[in-house]
Amino acid sequence: MPVRTSPAALAAATLSLLSAFAVPAVAWAQDRYPSKPVRIVVPFPAAGVTDLAARQVGQRLSETWGQPVVIDNRPGAGGTIGTELGARALPDGYTLTIGSVSTHAIAPSLYAKPGYDPVKDFAAITEIANTPNVLVINAALPVKTLKELVALAKKRPGELTFGSNGNGTNNHLAGEMLQAVTGIRMQHVPYKGSAFATNDLLGGHISMMFDVVLTALPMVKAGKLRALAVAAPVRSPVLPDVPTAAELGLGAFEAVVWLGLWAPAAVPQDILGRLHTDTVAVLKQPRVRDFFLSQGAQVVGSTQAQFAERIRSETARWKKVIDGAKVRVE
């Protein structure tokens, strides 16, 4: 006599059978990550330091994965437009973001509504590299040291000018820090980018600016600009004769541009682990280290936990600077 199976029992058996295949299928999919092109959102224009880093890392990851890595430049609003796009992407590991201290440590205090939370909306993968700002002046300015510059600024309060890439940018805030630490008073002149500010500095239209080593180095070597201090804990290997701000008595004066890799917050941990492992392996390649060194930057390759802590501490530090200088961008 045939055994009759109830619809409920049949459904349960079918579900059990499907479940048996589900775990291996998921594991197989994860083992194959990435199985299609990966997009890296860069929230700044092409040819800048963040873009160059993204293209270098993206190329090496593409070689590792055997999949294309597409660089997607989405500049605007101090990097917040592209960063918000990265935060809202599908959390499957196929859209990543390479941002910076500006997007993930400065923006939260600078903008009333940046459109994303740098901690809650992102999973930190690793700090890629960092490069210090260096204080450079027009070679015609009658000073040769930071001490002489401070003395001149105190003698002529409000007359000296310092340029920046725009209100609230890293090098603008570095100038505000310099005023706060030394007690001098200068006039801030914001530009729409580093190239415009540098051109006016070379032309003598502004007195000084903080700029990343990558941009300043060729003009310092050519004698067109004079480097007075590096805003980092240690001297730059490409400017070994330029002292740090701390060596010149400014204490823990630091304005370092650091770059990092993020994924949307809900990306599975095993994919994040793969991204971290592969990215750090890329950063350890001699050709990659040499590339960053040629740009005046140092490779980092931190753990996820170290990078997350870096973001928290930097956010708190820059908030004090922004609040103290009363800088806000709508």
Image (cartoon, rainbow, N blue to C red):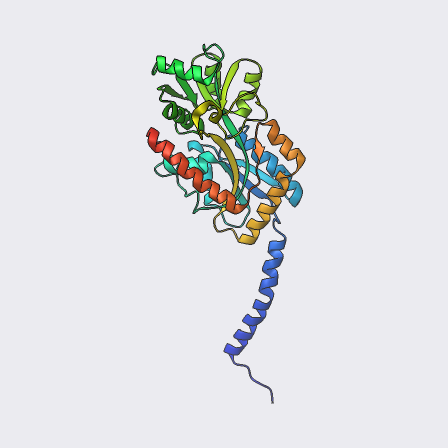
Q: Residue at x 63, y 42 (%)?
A: 281
Residue in the foreground of this view, choosing between 218 and 10: 218
Residue in the foreground of this view, choosing between 7 and 242: 242
Look at the picture and state if 31 lies above or below 97. Answer: below
Residue 46 is drawn in which quadrant?
top right
Return the residue found at the far left.
326
Residue in the foreground of this view, choosing between 80 and 214: 214
**Quadrant of the image containing the C terminus:** top left
Q: Residue at x 44, y 45 (%)?
A: 119
Q: Can residue 274 be seen in this view?
A: yes
Q: Which residue is drawn at 58% across and 85% down?
A: 3
Percent from the top left, x then y, of residue 128? 56, 38
**Quadrant of the image containing the N terminus:** bottom right
Residue 5 is drawn in which quadrant?
bottom right
Look at the picture and state if 77 lies above or below 272. Answer: above
On the rendered structure, is 187 left or right of 20? left
Percent from the top left, x then y, of residue 159? 36, 14
Percent from the top left, x then y, of residue 214? 55, 25
Percent from the top left, x then y, of residue 297? 57, 30
